[in-house]
Image (tube, rainbow, N blue to C red):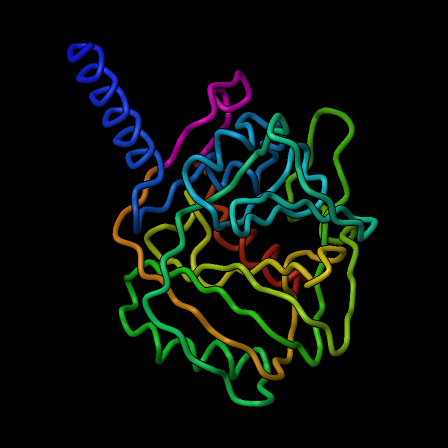
Amino acid sequence: MKKYLILLLVGIALHQHGNAQQAKPHHLFTAGVASGLMGGLFEGFYPVSKLLQHGNFGLGAPDKIDGELLVLNGVAYQTTSTGATRVLPGNHLVSFAMVHPFVTKRRLRAPAVISKSMFFTMLDTLMPQKNGLYAVHIKGRFKYLKTRAFPPVTSHPYPTLASMIPQQKFFEFENIEGELVGYRLPAYMDNTNISGYHFHFLSADKKHGGHIVDLTLSGVTIEIDQLESYTVELPDTEEFRHFDFHQNRAEDIKQVERGSKE
């Protein structure tokens, strides 16, 4: 009986250690490569159930670019180009995503009304290390929000994501409650990830979302987490093995982020 209890306790300890390794604090886990997504690697390869083992907070792209992906409180949400938002099942595959276990290191209230540019300027003062990795969670009321979602691709050869900009669908909201999930990543992570600011939205009623194009805040709480390391899980697919990564897609990433060629 004593031998059984020892083995049981060792098993529990190993299980807990395994979970800790999977969701390492202050560590950003990325499935896929951002420049590959920009170039047309839209096939999902990483299941949501496995992604959530690495973090409870993040964003990305669903299988075949069918809208936008957001992870909040350990739940994955998809906002499609119709505007509909739903919880993704564990077997859904993502083509690109970055997640981590969010730990609040700093919390504060934003001014009553602030524009997107003013907001980013303010965040820069709160995150002074230009080469640091930061996660940002915003919760509260937004005076104005403009989000977007891409339609799904249906057949090969897939286009580049930047060439699909004219097909994206926009959604506008006024005086809406909700949350922003986002990151500010340094320039050296461009092409593997997406440098600069990147935010996705989820409304309080979980019915609306999308990639943030523009916003005006109106009374929100800001939570910041600073990360210390990151890893990238590569797709084990035929398309990835033959993809040409020589092309610099930094400008494509910028256009897709702002939702415009200009």
Residue 169 x/y as whole percent: 79, 55
Number of on-image labels: 0
Q: Report whether 216 appears left or right of 81.
A: left
The residue shown at (77%, 77%) is: 174
Residue for point 60% across, 43% down: 76
117 or 24: nearer the viewer: 24
Query: Quadrant location of residue 5?
Result: top left
Q: Horizontal and vertical percent for residue 117?
A: 54, 80
Q: Percent x, y for residue 87?
A: 68, 42
| Residue 243 within the segment the image draws in magenta | yes
Picture quadrant of residue 20: top left
143 shown above or below 106: below
Q: Residue furthest bottom?
A: 112
Which residue occupies 29% across, 31% down? 16
Residue at 44 percent of width and 62 percent of height:
196
Q: Is residue 204 magenta?
A: no
Find the residue positioned furthest to the right: 82
Task: Quadrant for the C terminus, please.
Answer: bottom right
Percent coordinates x, y for residue 59 in the rendering: 54, 49
Query: In which quadrant will I find the N terminus?
Result: top left
Between 33 and 119, the one lying in front of the other is 119
Horizontal side, residue 184 vs residue 259: left or right = left
Q: Is residue 186 above or below residue 235?
A: below
- Magenta residues, as a range? 232-245
Between 18 and 65, the one nearer to me in the picture: 18
Question: In the image, 114: left or right of 203?
Answer: left
